[in-house]
Amino acid sequence: VIKKIVKPLQSSKPSKEISIDELKAARIKKINEMREANINPFAYSWKITHDSKKLKSQWELLEPGGEDNSVEVFVSGRIIAKRIFGKLIFFSLQDQFGSIQLYLDQGKLGKENFSEVKKWIDTGDILGAKGSIKRTSKGELSVNVNEWSILTKSLLPLPDKFHGLKDTEKRYRQRHLDMIANPEVRETFKQRAVVTSGIRRDLDDMGFLEIETPVLQTVTGGAAAKPFQTYHNALDLNLTLRISTELHLKRLVVGGIDRVYELGRIFRNEGISTRHNPEFTSVEIYQAYADYSEMMDLCEKLIGSASERTNGSLKIEYQGTEIDLTPPFRRVNMNQLVFNECGFNFEECKDLGAAIKVAVDAGLSKAADLSTIGEVLNLCFEEMCEEKLIQPTFVTDYPTEVSPLAKPHRTKKNFTERFELFICGREIAN
């Protein structure tokens, strides 16, 4: 009996973990070696003829093992994976539309050129490549490279390809790494851009005019929020960043611009969470000679249009729940929603004590500190109703006490003609 002895591929000694500083030093050394070899590790430009999406579409029917030598393609992107098999190297090249494989054959590149690729190119580097199109025997569409150029040498490695970038805080603070490690995040950015440009297009088509209003303001207004403070050196003037665009847009309406809006950044020096950011984008829209019913109609149209542009449908799925954005949305006044929960009609109530008792009996102890029936009604709504509004719902007719800038209701005393839109238990518009 002949026994075959197979030696282990890895040493039994524990391997030393390489630090980020050591990896960076090794890559800087490669940069210096490339410069000594008259190769610029940070190129100025690269001609691009195809992206990964176009390649996969144009050569969709190419058979495994086949090659198209009739055309040469120029591609570029970031190397996210590197595999070496003797005289072959396979790179996964990621661009903004996806990824494509680079097939590097020593026989085609030449021994010296091939060894330079092995020696100098790391994951994370941005590479330009030229070559024909082939599909490997395993069915992977590839660029059969005959020329390459390092476009940007990466000084740091990518996040671990097996575990990815999972740290939530790092993902939010270093979005560039998040987009590299989690390609679906790029799609979110693209869809957001489609939403904002679509809103502008729709409003422009309806005859609205977008006008930029001041970000630095001497008087804060339009919302109840704490502003960021700054100082203007030349004018010796204390200023704040805007917490709303409302006041300036209303002045434009007064000045004779009947339909006006601004889609821009707002700054509020308050708490931060996954639902609230101190700096965010909002769109404020003002239309002369229109009431809140017409503005609800407008809101529905904008949201429905945004959904169709990004999803191709008015029905979307959010956290396992199907949301139907088909207009018209449900419209119900605040008092009715609270009445459905506790059976008490706040609109007809004249006794503050009775209103407070209803709220306290429902477990809302904070109601005991409130001084008006409207405030109690609003508290009951926020605590008992908001999170249950999953499908799109316009909540209308808010109490005067919580709506200082809204028009008084034409038929209900102590109420206003104001709405807020809720979807999935969150306020989306007002």
Image (cartoon, helix red, strand yellow):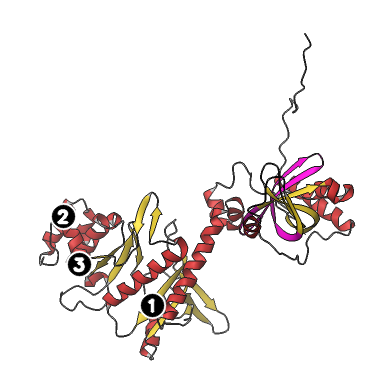
What quarter of the picture does the N terminus occupy? top right
Amino acid type, callout 3: Gly
Q: Residues within 10 Å of mark 2 (few under 14, many from 20)?
A: some
Seen at 73% across and 25% down, the residue is 12
Q: Position of residue 61 (x, y in %)?
A: 64, 52
Q: Nearer the viewer, mark 2 or mark 3?
A: 2
Identify which residue, 247 or 66, lies in the foreground.
66
Q: CA distance from mark 1 to mark 2?
A: 35 Å
Q: Quadrant of residue 262?
A: bottom left
Q: Position of residue 45 (x, y in %)?
A: 76, 67
Question: Which residue does the numbered mark 1 point to in the structure image?
Answer: 285
Question: Which residue does the numbered mark 3 point to in the structure image?
Answer: 374
Magenta span: 71-99
Seen at 67% across and 46% down, the residue is 140
Q: Point out the tag, 2 or 3, that comes first from the N-terminus.
A: 2
Residue 372 at least partly seen: no
Which structural element holds mark 3? Answer: helix
Q: Is residue 96 magenta?
A: yes
